[in-house]
Image (cartoon, helix red, strand yellow):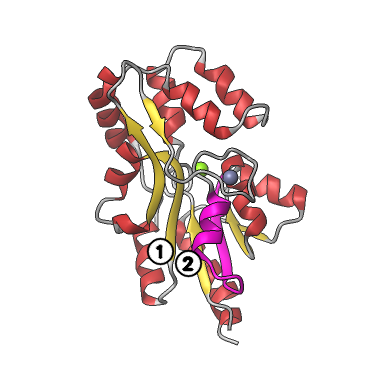
Amino acid sequence: MNKPIIFCDFDGTITNTDNIIAIMKRFAPPAWEEIKDQVLLQTIPIQLGVSRMFALLPSASRKEITDYILNHAEIREGFKEFVAFTKEEEIPLYIVSGGIDFFVEPLLDGLVPKEQIYCNRSDFTNEKIKIVWPYTCDDECTNECGCCKPTLIRKFANQDDFKIVIGDSITDLQAAKLGDKVIARDFLVQKCEELGINHSSFHSFFDVIEILKKEVLTNASN
Ligand code: MG
Ligand code: ZN
């Protein structure tokens, strides 16, 4: 009876590695590392951390940065098949990403329709790159997420939907807490274990399809 609905992260989940980290490693002065550590330790909010990191980069590098990411990012194995599977099973799929439009949208081009993608935007009109936040936290979230995944879940899921959250890191944790089932890799697995959140771990999206077949579709139909 409970309809499944999927909220899937982008960086480090759909792509093999985190693209913001890759951009900073390649283009930012060393100061970015301290900002990243503060975000991971949750001493500063994600939104502030990402703003500060991109403010280290000149807007003039736009093309160089974009080309670098489009040439280096890899889509995780099985993702295309996973998208086809959700379509076949008529499971709504939302990409909820703390990534930035200038790399998220081209990397998903031809894989996921644009209206299913929710990410941050970029403004290259000033000297340094400015991040624009169209999906900030609602009244119920005080986390200053930047792109607020819990807010998007509240917006798109009905209360009795079976909410599936797919992700890899600290930036998925608040969403994972709202999920009925979390499909996790990397740091998010550890966090789910610590907090006792119902989860399975995955490596490729073929694993995700198997998990959905076994654990979600059988439950959802009764
Ligand atoms: Mg991620
Ligand atoms: Zn939030």
What residue sits 42% from the left and 43% below the top? Answer: 134
Q: Which mark is residue 34?
A: none
* Viewer-nearest residue: 140 or 180: 140
Specify the quadrant that holds the N terminus. Answer: bottom right
- Rendering coords of residue 60 (x, y %): 25, 18
- Rendering coords of residue 7 (x, y %): 50, 58
Which residue is the extreme one toward the bottom?
222
Residue 26, quarter of picture:
top left
Q: Are marks 1 and 2 in contact (CB under 8 Å)?
A: yes
Q: Is residue 182 above or below residue 162?
A: above
Specify the quadrant that holds the C terminus. Answer: bottom right
- Rendering coords of residue 120 (x, y %): 41, 40
Question: Is residue 17 something that shows in the picture?
Answer: yes
Q: Is residue 165 above or below residue 129?
A: below
Residue 119, quarter of picture:
top left
Instruction: Please report the bounds of the magenta region as a residue range.
Output: 149-168
Alpha carbon separation for disc pair 1 and 2: 6 Å
* Viewer-nearest residue: 186 or 143: 143
The three-letter code of the residue at mark 2 reads: Ile
What residue sits 50% from the left and 18% below the top? Answer: 32
What residue sits 54% from the left and 28% below the top? Answer: 48
SS class of the residue under badge 1?
A: helix
Label 2 beta carbon less than 8 Å to ligand 1:
no
Q: Which residue is mark 1?
A: 82
Q: Is residue 204 left or right of residue 112?
A: right
Residue 103 falls within the magenta-colored stretch: no
Residue 167 falls within the magenta-colored stretch: yes
Badge 1, how many Cα within 10 Å: few under 14, some, many 20+?
some
The three-letter code of the residue at mark 1 reads: Phe
Question: Is residue 112 something that shows in the picture?
Answer: no
SS class of the residue under badge 2?
A: helix
